[in-house]
Image (cartoon, grey):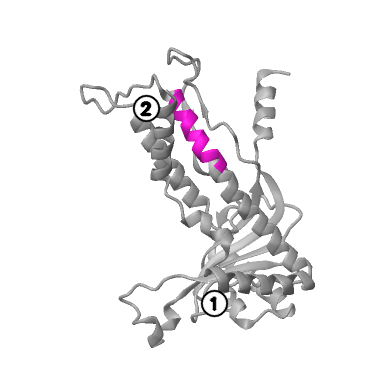
Amino acid sequence: PTSDEEKQKSLEEFMPEYTGVTCLMGCANVPFMRGICFPSSATSKCHACYYPTKVPKDKVKEEEDNADKDKYEMVFQIYFPSPIERPDTWRTLTPDEAKAECQELAKKLREDGWDEQFLAPLESQSLKGVLRVGLRSREALDVWHVGGGSEDGSVGVGRAVLLGDAAHPPVPYIGQGAQMAMEDAGTLSLLLGHFCPMDGDGDATIIDLSKFQDAMDVYEKLRVPRTKAVLGSSVQLGKTQQKRADSMLYNAWREFSIKAQVWAYGTLPVMRPGAAFNYHAKVEEALKELETTL
C-alpha cells in the first residue's frame, strides 16, 4: 500500500464509530419542572434526560417563593435509535428545522403516552439551540503524545499532546466530557511547569523540553486510568438507559434502584467519581512518589 493508503487506514482505525443512537437536544423557556428526570419509552425505544438551568438571582426570588417559574429554561436531551447516521448531524438546526423536527418527535412521544411536561419544551415558541447529534464512541487511547522519546531530548517528529475529546471521546450520559478535558489541561499544565521550566533568562517563549518524555509518562499514568473509569461509567449508564426503553420490567426495577440510591447517597453513585476529584493533589502525589524512586 502507498503512504497515503497507510495513513488513511491508520485514521480509520482510530475513528469513533457511530453507536446507532441519535440525540436531539436543545432548551426552551417553560414552567419549572422538578430536578433532573430520565423518562423512557418502551414503545419507540426512546429515552431522555431533562434538567432545569439555574435562574439568575436578579430574575427570581428564593425558589420556595415560587416566583417567576416560567423563567426557568428546561434543557432536553432525547435519545432514539437511528440505524443510519445522517450526514448533517453535529450542527445547530435552523429555527424552521428545529421546529419541524421537535414537533414531529413530540407527536410520536405523545402517541407513546409521554407526560405533557416532557413535550412542552419541544413545542414551545421559545425553543432554541437545537442540535441533532449522532453519538460516536471508541476506546480511549493509551498513548496521548508523540515526540520527545529519545534519551538526549531530541525528537524525530514534532511534539504533540492530546487532551479532552481528542484522547477520549465521550458519550454524554453522565455529562463528564468537559470536566475530563479541564482535568487533563490542569494536570498537563502542572506537569509541564515541573518538568519543562521556562528559560532561565525569563524568556516565556523558550522552555526546557529535555524532560518532556518524563512529563508525558506521568501525564498518561494519571489521566488514562482516570478517564477510562469515568467515561466507561458513562457508556454503561447509556446502556442501562437503553435497557429501560427496551424492557418495561427492567424499567420498573431500575426506577426502584434509582430512588433507593438517591435516598441512600443523595445522588447516583456513578456521578460521584466525576465531582469528588482533585487533580492538583493527584499530581503532587505522583511527583512525591517519583522522588522516592530516584
Nearer-the-camera pick, 131 or 42: 42
**Residue 241, can we see it?**
yes
Which is more foreground, mark 1 or mark 2?
A: 2
Q: Which residues are magenta?
A: 213-225
Residue 12 in percent (x, y) is at 68, 34
Vertical placement of residue 138 versus 57, above or below: above
The stretch drawn in magenta includes residue 88: no
Q: Are marks 1 and 2 in contact (CB under 8 Å)?
A: no
Question: Which one is in front, 195 or 157?
Answer: 195
Point out residue 57 in the picture as x, y percentages from the top left corner: 32, 75
- Mark 1 and mark 2: Cα distance apart in space: 54 Å
Neighbours of disc 2 within 10 Å: few (<14), some (14-19), many (20+): some
Q: Residue at x 26, y 28 (%)?
A: 204
Q: Quadrant of residue 10?
A: top right
Q: Residue furthest top?
A: 152
Left or right of 183 in this view: 25:
right
Q: Quadrant of the N terminus?
A: top right
Magenta residues, dominant SS class:
helix
Q: Name the residue located 48 percent from the left edge and 51 percent from the top edge.
A: 178
Give the residue drawn at x 55%, y 39%: 224
Q: Which residue corresponds to mark 2?
A: 195
Q: Residue at position x 42%, y 45% from top?
A: 279
Please state, as top left, top right, bottom left or bottom right, where the C terminus lies in the image.
Answer: top left
Instruction: Report the residue that reaches farthest toward the left.
Output: 201
Amino acid tagged 1 = Ser
Mark 1 sits on what residue?
A: 124
Above or below, 15 relative to 51 = above
**The one of 165 and 131 positioned closer to us in this rendering:** 165
Q: Amino acid at mark 2?
A: Phe
Relative image position of residue 122 (x, y in whole percent): 59, 73
Q: Secondary structure at mark 2?
A: helix
Question: Is residue 214 magenta-colored?
Answer: yes
